[in-house]
Image (tube, rainbow, N blue to C red):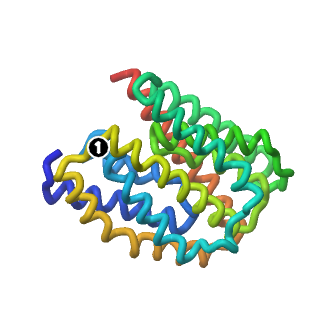
């Protein structure tokens, strides 16, 4: 990767967008900004660039998503699966067919959103489920390690619980704070960042405060229904992106 003005501008814009999503919705939609990074670097380099930056985003976001916004019962159920999933994702990184995983995750996500629309696009509160939480945590761990796309499995578990927008975003933020801290070292081992990539990380670090803060302002303006509708909409965008990546990979 050559560190040009174009590379810096595009990478900075991608990281800023990811930070904005972190501030607005607590995280889980980092894949929205990854298409921008793909214009100037390969997927592994992008993963190596984002791994330390995710930690910086998470630490800065803690000023907004404090302990009072975390759903501890859900985190207790979700985090063991997350950690196991990250470990499995790392061990199987070179053996897994990333295209098939992307397509499968996209189809499941689109079905989930489709069922929500059939019900009238309203939040129907469902009881907490240990088995669903463990499955969601495991799936999120694998997909966040393989493709930085751990948001859909977590959202599919949390959204039907009918949490307040603060608790939903705070729980999501804390979930990915643990996940991003755990997967940083494995991703750096896989990517082996060059000196140029470390320099780019330092530059993109400047996007963290403004991106997260602006996202938080949006979070404060939107009401409960709007937050949930946007989250479901973002799931569709994420699913379409995953589906495109998977199908395009087979056609290439």
Q: Looking at the image, is 199 positioned above or below residue 222?
A: above
Q: Quadrant of residue 95?
A: top left
Q: Position of residue 4 (x, y in %)?
A: 13, 55
Q: Residue at (35%, 57%) from the top-left corner?
A: 14
Q: Quadrant of residue 111?
A: top right
Q: Position of residue 71 (x, y in %)?
A: 73, 63
Q: Looking at the image, is 112 positioned above or below residue 171?
A: above
Using the rendered image of the protein, determine whether residue 43 is visible from the camera's viewpoint: no
Q: Looking at the image, is 198 positioned above or below residue 138?
A: below
Q: Nearer the viewer, residue 102 or 229?
A: 102
Q: Nearer the viewer, residue 19 or 70?
A: 70
Q: Residue at (61%, 38%) from the top-left corner?
A: 139
Describe residue 111's horizontal placement relative to residue 180 as left or right.
Answer: right
Q: Residue at (40%, 53%) from the top-left corner?
A: 33
**Residue at label 1?**
45
Quadrant for the C terminus in the image: top left
Quadrant for the N terminus in the image: top left
Q: Residue at (34%, 41%) from the top-left corner?
A: 189
Question: Badge 1: how crowded within 10 Å, few (<14), some, or many (20+)?
Answer: many
Q: Position of residue 2 (x, y in %)?
A: 13, 48
Describe residue 221's horizontal placement relative to residue 241 as left or right.
Answer: right
| Figure disc tally | 1
Label 1 SS: helix
Using the rendered image of the protein, determine whether residue 178 is visible from the camera's viewpoint: yes
Furthest residue toward right: 127
Q: Position of residue 214 (x, y in %)?
A: 46, 75
């Amino acid at each position: 990767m050559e560190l040009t003005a174009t590379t810096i501008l595009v990478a900075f814009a991608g990281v800023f967008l990811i930070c904005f999503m972190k501030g607005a919705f607590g995280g889980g939609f980092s894949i929205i900004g990854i298409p921008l990074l793909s214009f100037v670097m390969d997927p592994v380099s992008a993963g190596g660039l984002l791994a330390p930056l995710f930690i910086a985003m998470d630490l800065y976001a803690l000023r907004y998503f404090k302990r009072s916004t975390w759903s501890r019962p859900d985190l207790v159920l979700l985090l063991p699966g997350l950690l196991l999933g990250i470990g499995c994702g790392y061990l199987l990184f070179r053996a897994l067919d990333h295209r098939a995983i992307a397509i499968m995750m996209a189809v499941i996500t689109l079905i989930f959103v489709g069922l929500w629309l059939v019900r009238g696009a309203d939040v129907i509160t469902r009881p907490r489920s240990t088995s669903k939480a463990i499955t969601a945590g495991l799936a999120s761990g694998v997909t966040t390690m393989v493709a930085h796309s751990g948001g859909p499995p977590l959202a599919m578990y949390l959204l039907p619980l009918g949490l307040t927008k603060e608790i939903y975003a705070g729980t999501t933020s804390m979930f990915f704070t643990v996940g991003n801290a755990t997967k940083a070292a494995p991703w750096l081992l896989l990517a082996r960042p060059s000196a140029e990539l470390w320099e780019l990380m330092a530059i993109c670090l400047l996007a963290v405060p403004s991106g997260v803060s602006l996202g938080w302002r949006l979070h404060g303006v939107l009401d409960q229904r709007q937050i949930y509708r946007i989250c479901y909409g973002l799931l569709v965008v994420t699913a379409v992106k995953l589906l495109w990546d998977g199908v395009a990979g087979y056609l290439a």
